[in-house]
Image: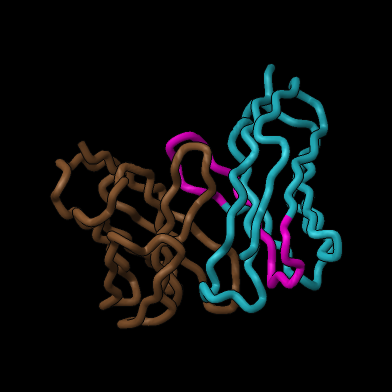
Chain colours: A brown, B cyan
Amino acid sequence: DGGITQSPKYLFRKEGQNVTLSCEQNLNHDAMYWYRQDPGQGLRLIYYSQIVNDFQKGDIAEGYSVSREKKESFPLTVTSAQKNPTAFYLCASNLLDGSPLHFGNGTRLTVT
Amino acid sequence: KQEVTQIPAALSVPEGENLVLNCSFTDSAIYNLQWFRQDPGKGLTSLLLIQSSQREQTSGRLNASLDKSSGRSTLYIAASQPGDSATYLCAVRLRDSNSGYALNFGKGTSLLVTP
């Protein structure tokens, strides 16, 4: 079955450490996105990519980095520069024609 | 910037009731609007996508309407069931978005259907 796989489901890190969240899709989608979800807030866009080797900052890109070396993969690195990294991170993808957005099951990151 | 608001923030209804969830947006120049369902600790599941040229979409017991001129969409759930309990999110994509095909999300309506 086609879908979006995010791993790991839960991630714990010490403050000051960088951490990378994985996102893989086998839907042959062109565009991929990273969103952050905090309690009581809507989803906020971190980064997005519409084509391999190209990506753009979203609304809250500071303290994060991404790469898009393959169409299927869009990993997100949460750096030590991110002030409040503890959150639920969601990866999504769709075709470039504005078709429905599909989501992975998320990674819950806790930084202490 | 597009603001998306969902009212109410939470809703509790007895099983069998028909209900309406509301979504409003500030910029009527949208490309499409999508309704999602989110179960606790999970990702989002797409329910319905309405293109800007459409007025409504239906899937089973769900019906979503779109009124661009007033900046509103509603999600109608018929004959609610306990399994419908979840958070429902509305999201819009602007026609001239600077975020590619990304969506702007509301904060969601948390629905509880009691047996």
The C terminus of chain B - image quarter: top right
- Write the residue at 66% across / 30% down: B10
Please, is residue B7 above or below residue A79 in the view? above
Please, is residue B114 above or below residue B57 in the view? above
- Write the residue at 26% across / 39% down: A110
- Write the residue at 78% across / 49% down: B74
Camera-side residue: B33 or A5?
B33
- The number of numbered discs placed on residues in the rendered structure image is 0
Camera-side residue: A28 or A53?
A53
Camera-side residue: A77 or A29?
A77
Q: Is residue B28 magenta?
A: yes
Residue B105 placed where, x, y %? 59, 54
Camera-side residue: A10 or A79?
A79
Residue B42 placed where, x, y %? 45, 41
Residue A88 in the figure: left or right of residue B45? left
- Specify start and end residues of the magenta stretch as a single range: B25-45
- Write the residue at 44% across / 42% down: A38
Q: Residue B72 appears in which quarter of the rendering?
A: bottom right
Q: Say if residue B1 shows up in the picture.
A: yes
The N terminus of chain B - image quarter: bottom right
Residue B18 placed where, x, y %? 82, 33
Residue B52 placed where, x, y %? 76, 70
Q: Is residue A101 magenta?
A: no
Q: Residue B95 appears in which quarter of the rendering?
A: bottom right
Q: Say if residue A3 shows up in the picture.
A: no
